[in-house]
Amino acid sequence: MSGGTRLENANPLIFQRSGDRLLTATDEDEDAADPIDDREIFDLIRSINDPEHPLSLEELNVVEQMRVNVNDEESTVSVEFTPTIPHCSMATLIGLSLKVKLLRSLPDRFKIDVHITPGTHASEDAVNKQLADKERVAAALENSQLLEVVNQCLSTRTM
């Protein structure tokens, strides 16, 4: 938070959560081939907590299923996120939280790209460069205080 106690976006728009994914018999069949798809990735990230508000990234419309792209055959996952305001100082932390959640949840074969939706943040190039740099991400996760904040974003919150 900037200024110690003042929220950057004190009154964010709150969006309705999408419904839960309906499971089919094929989804529950352990022997069936089950490629990872956009909805599965969205389900992993939708409940991540915003670092500034007691709301999920989905409720703030920071993440949307239509901004998730998965190619299971090529083992790539791309997630665009949209900060609530163009000068959001939490954008890097949000991106790092998204990246960590996916790194912890997906098989190692996946290349994960997390970036800001083009044209939605004043420093999108700098934030995207940080999130794409493996060494910077690894160094950030070695910082115990930063890792604690990321883990708070990833913790389960009661609805």
Image (spheres, rainbow, N blue to C red):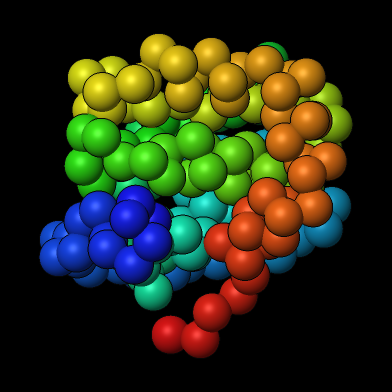
**Count of all numbered marks drawn on residues in the image:** 0
Residue 63, image x, y percentages: 37, 46
If the image is split into quadrants, where does the N terminus sit? bottom left
Front residue of 30 and 132: 132
Q: Residue at x 26, y 23 (%)?
A: 122
Q: Nearer the viewer, residue 27 or 3?
A: 3
Res. 82 image quadrant: top left
- Give coordinates of residue 28: x percent, y percent: 70, 64
In the rendered image, the vertical position of residue 132 relative to residue 3, given as above or below: above
Image quadrant for the C terminus?
A: bottom left
| Residue pictured at 38% horizontal, 61% vertical | 4
**Residue 158: x and y, percent?**
51, 86
From the viewer's perspective, is 53 left or right of 156? left
Q: Residue at x 71, y 29 (%)?
A: 137
Q: Is residue 65 visible?
A: no
- Residue farthest toward the front in the current orientation of the protein: 3
Q: Is 132 displayed left or right of 32 in the figure?
A: left
Q: Is residue 104 above or below residue 151?
A: above
Q: Is residue 31 left or right of residue 120?
A: right
Q: Residue at x 85, y 31 (%)?
A: 108
Counting from the top left corner in percent of width and height, residue 32 is at 77, 48
The one nearer the camera, 78 or 19, is 78
- Considering every residue shown, the one lying at the far bottom of the view is 158
Residue 2 visible? The answer is yes
